[in-house]
Image: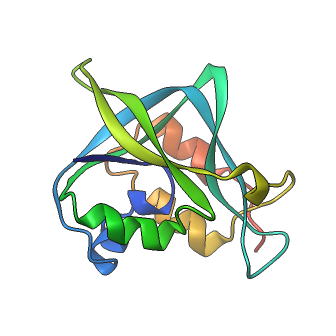
Amino acid sequence: MRYFAYGSNMDPERMKERGIQFSKREHAILKGFRLEFNKITNRNTNEGKANIVDDDEKSLEGILYEIKDNDLEKLDKYEGCPKHYTKKDVNVILDNGKTVEAITYIAQPNMTRKGLKPTREYLIHLLRGCDLLSKEYCEMLKKVETLD
């Protein structure tokens, strides 16, 4: 099963800590969406987690994992699915130009709010995907304003 991560799960160590085994990890692009940090948290009313928002003019980068089917249940737990995030089937483009189907998570509309920012600690997890992400995308992530 293919899972497309665009947030903190781009960090391979985070995936391992969560007990998610993956046989493959590669760069992928999702067109028609943009990255926002508009997913509310329970800890801080100003803190935002990563989310994707429909935008025909944009695209975002992420990490495509090949995982075992039963590990999706573990991801559901960590992503707060279905209360906080819901699963979505998406088509992502690999570096070789091939389009493949994957599952990703998108925040429930009632769990989002404008004006939120990630913590520095959270953003570091995204930056740990920079071994596979483009230099430009990593530079954009490094410029994201954080709460601390």
Residue 101 sits in quarter: top left
- Residue 20 in percent (x, y) is at 26, 69
Which one is nearer the viewer's eye here, 133 or 52? 52
Q: Colour mode?
A: rainbow
Q: Residue at x 50, y 45 (%)?
A: 138
Q: Residue at x 65, y 30 (%)?
A: 54
Residue 116 sits in quarter: bottom right
Q: Is residue 148 left or right of residue 58?
A: right
- Residue 134 in percent (x, y) is at 41, 37
Residue farthest toward the front in the current orientation of the protein? 82
Q: Residue at x 33, y 38 (%)?
A: 102
- Residue 93 in percent (x, y) is at 34, 25
Q: Quadrant of the C terminus?
A: bottom right
Relative to 8, residue 139 above or below: above
Q: Is residue 17 left or right of residue 107?
A: left
Relative to 42, residue 12 above or below: above
Q: Residue at x 34, y 77 (%)?
A: 18
Relative to 23, residue 61 above or below: above
Relative to 110, residue 46 above or below: below
- Residue 108 in percent (x, y) is at 67, 53
Which one is nearer the viewer's eye here, 82 or 42? 82
Which one is nearer the viewer's eye here, 13 or 91? 91
